[in-house]
Image (cartoon, rainbow, N blue to C red):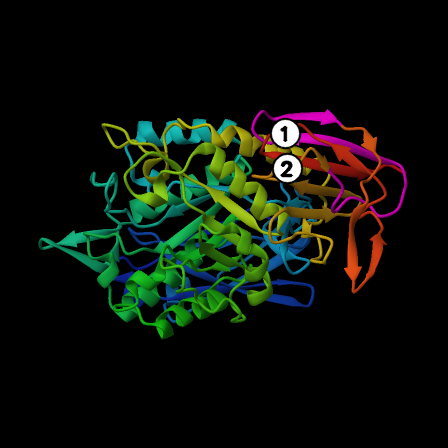
Amino acid sequence: MTTTEKWDIFEAVFEGPSEGNPYLEIAFDAVFSHKGREIRVPGFYDGDGTYRLRFMPETEGEWRYVTRSATPALDGHEGRLTCTPPSPGNHGPVRVRDKFHFAHADGTPFLSFGTTCYAWTHQPMDEQEKTLATLSKAGFNKIRMGVFPKDYPYNTNEPLHDIYETVDGRRDFDRPNFAAFRHFETRIGQLRDMGIEADVIMFHPYDRWGYCDMSEAQDYRYVAYIAARFGAYRNLWWALANEYDFMIDTKPMERWDRFFQILEEEDPYRHLKSIHNGHADANYDHRKPWVTHTCIQNWDVKRTQDWRDTWGKPVVNDEPEYEGDIIECWGNISAQELVHRYWVTMMRGGYIGHGETYGDPDDRIWWAKGGELRGEAWKRIKWMRELLEEDVTRGLEPLAPSVQWPWHRVSGAQDGDVRYIYLGEHQPSIWALGLPKEDGDYKLDLIDTWDMTVTPLDRVPAPANHPVRHGEVVQPRAPHAAFAVELPRRTGLAIRCRRIS
């Protein structure tokens, strides 16, 4: 009997008709059953009379399946597999946990530290290998990447593959180029083996090949096809679009809603699903039930708590502007500023993405094509991830706003017995706000977010608060905290406070 570990891929291959256009004309699926549970799994055509069925078992034990199709050659095939325990490092797909955070299916926390390489899988093979080599050391655990190639400044070269075949001189959106899909899923699998989530972007507006102009029926068929083809990869996230509102004239809102619904119907594994805006005021209604998390682009990261309150879901600001030096303002912030925005966002209970856009004579820019990183932010982001993963087990919750906590200026968060206060652009010589109000056994550290150092801090008495005058009566006020810490006068610092008893 075939064995497949939990959250890995079982694949069955069948031979069937190749004449006509099976992509359009033939459908088949299977029902997988385990004890009293049944799961419908869609199959897909892979060219040359080959049909595939991929299943990701999420429960250990024996599974049975039977195929269903109006095509006799694909109907009634039966089989069995045994789902074995997952191997080390296989934690299963990422899900939403505790409303605003993420965890793998086995409960392992997932703090999202993503990057963007929109068209890396469409570059020459040697460049793609450089991207994988870079990712192996860069510390990112998620990458945004598009199924379709991209036509945009700094990214105008021809792609490695066309996504659809050309027939009689015209691209035929009813005839997939199966080699392109095989290549893309190979890269998803390689990312999985590196512990990196593939945030797969289905549509984007930057196009000279006609993909934006596919008909409604072609769009729906494409979404269902990639759901069947890619869905069994445990490291998959669905991103319906990069900047969906730039395509709203050709893909109206009801079509975007339907894309989500197709994924609900065709993806039995409930992978994370989001959609990404272009204009800052053009957010999709992330409260809709099929959206799992809020994916946005916005430079004003201090609004992270507002977005959490508005949408009631995890916030991933995948485009807070990029480290680089190109002429476009979204692509020329400093490494220091991007690191700052990382800390602000995560201390306000959200997640944030990296991108790098340094100009290059050959347009080898990470954000577009991958390759090699040239900046400095990624090193600090990797270090930040390692630092937070030492202590954070559920997800960082922002410190509650109060008259004694300047939440609109300074960012702070906690998870269990660890608390962080990020001072950012502020450089006080002494600090007490947000530190514990009761005395106790705490370990205090100074974090330098740029120099990547952690230095022990000693307590000092908390300064008295400024007195408050009520008419002619001056009332003293108690200190904000049980103690304070003295700090060097420089920016980019954070305080970590851990209870140790």
Q: Quadrant of residue 215?
A: bottom left
User: Which of 470 and 173 lies nearest the eye of the viewer?
Assistant: 470
Q: Is residue 433 magenta?
A: yes
Q: Is residue 370 visible?
A: yes
The numbered mark at residue 489 is 1
Q: How many marks?
A: 2
Q: Which residues are magenta?
A: 431-456
**Few, some or many residues within 10 Å of mark 2 (<14, 14–19, 20+):** few
**Few, some or many residues within 10 Å of mark 1 (<14, 14–19, 20+):** few
Work out whether 132 lies above or below 245. above
Q: Quadrant of residue 381?
A: top right
**In whole angstroms, how far apart are the C-alphas of marks 2 and 1?**
42 Å
Q: Residue at x 59, y 31 (%)?
A: 449
Q: What is the three-letter code of the residue carrying label 1? A: Arg
Q: Whole-percent x and y of residue 316? A: 52, 52
In the displayed orientation, state which residue is furthest to the front: 472
The numbered mark at residue 89 is 2
Query: In the image, 305: left or right of 359?
Result: right
At numbered mark 2, what does the secondary structure look like: helix, strand or loop? loop
